[in-house]
Amino acid sequence: HRRLASVKPTDEWQLMQEIEFSRMADLSFSVGDVKELGTYGKVGVYDHAYDRVTSRLERPLKAAGTVRYNVTASEDPVLAKIASTSNEVKVFATDAVVALLMASTVSFSAWDIVVNRVGDKLFLDKRDGGPVDFPPVNENATEPPPEASDKTGSINSAPMLALESRDIVRNYIKQITGKASIDLEHANPFNEGASDADKTADDNAYRYRVFDLSARADGSDDEADAPANDSGERCFMAVRTEIDGVIAAGAQKQRQLFIRALTQHDINATGAGNAFDWRAKLDTQRAAVIAIENKNNGSKLARWAFQAVLADADQIRLGFVARASPRDRTRHGILGFQSYVPADMLAQLKLSEFKAWGIVKAIVDMCLQLDEGRYVIMRDPNRSVICLYSVPPGTFENDDAEDAPLSAPATDDADF
């Protein structure tokens, strides 16, 4: 099965380096102390009525009626303020981009990250409408969904399934946390001047954190023993993470949730991955259903697990949402959920947080050696290789998301 590139290099792109997955297999790094920079926005409180949902007592999935932004790091006002006021923090990214790097060695489909080197700062960005916004469905299946290059293809093509899945996740989060909300420490940074009634206001909540990526002597956890990179400077990375919901815990600390949903479209379609019919098997053979999903969607689940780790979420709440009819991509039913402690989900997926940080550390160190300019890190669509390209400064600035073969249909910034 040949896969399509997430974006096609042009003659103006200069290949600077190729990194084989095999070379990243032995990387490992223990991240230093994490500094909290505050929480922003309003977060929904989990509705425990959804604890009782089963495949026999399913709930119809409702349209959210709100939007959730996924603004890239270099356009984030909070990260921009940190970049302008801090001499120590050099690297800036969102959790989705960092998690994509962490899970890179288990990815099968192509993806890309835009690297912007500005002065001594490094921004790891994403393209609107690209693979960071639309994680694939059944990417790791033996026969994945067909990758139609046109956007008017089958509703079961890879781009259309990715778009459907993105919308389902957005609606699912709102539905199970929409009855009540809690104001966090600061106002949503993307809603300046917006009213509560503004339907285009961002409905997301964020937690900003700074990770210490400084090299450590002999694996020491002592901050004083972390001299740094080759230039002798400390290396800190600011990351915007997501808070999808909270579980009220009385007088105790509220539990922070990272919420996503797996989707089932048509079990008879090409790329269904030999999945069971969830309506028939989820309640009675849950372990088998989960095992198949781990196999077919290992890359996406890895990305979500690492995002939860980056946010220091207390729990991952993973919903199961299926089409009401295999031929209708607009109506869906909520059939149940599975909850995980993030570390336990990583263990189930046979992933290591230390190895994942090793990959991030290696990529960041490589990018900090680059001259000012714009670069692209790409996962080759048909080889287990990451490629680093130098690209012209204006690359992607005027592009429509329609240009990306694997992208779902072009949308605005309100996506995952």
Image (spheres, rainbow, N blue to C red):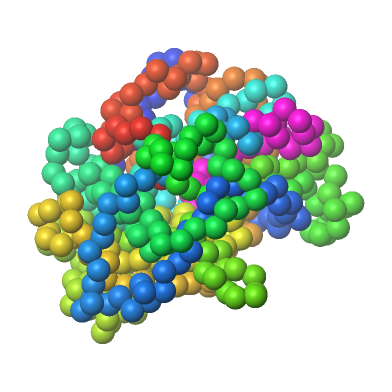
Q: Which residues are magenta?
A: 80-104
Q: List x then y, in percent, for residue 86.
A: 77, 33
Q: Quadrant of residue 383?
A: top left
Horizontal relation, residue 23 to residue 179: left or right: right
Q: In the picture, residue 90 is in which quadrant?
A: top right
Q: Position of residue 14 (x, y in %)?
A: 49, 20
Question: Looking at the image, which is closer to me, 115 or 329?
Answer: 329
Q: Dividing the image into 4 quarters, which one contains the C terminus? A: top left
Residue drawn at x 25%, y 68% is: 59
Residue 92: image x %, image y %?
A: 63, 37
Q: Is residue 177 left or right of residue 42?
A: left
Position of residue 255 relative to residue 301, above or below, is below
Q: Main secondary structure of the magenta part?
A: helix
Q: Residue at x 85, y 45 (%)?
A: 227
Q: Residue at x 28, y 45 (%)?
A: 163
The part of the image, by quadrant, that contains residue 148 is: top left
Q: Residue furthest bottom?
A: 284
- Relative to 126, say whether 98 is above or below: below
Magenta stretch: includes residue 285? no
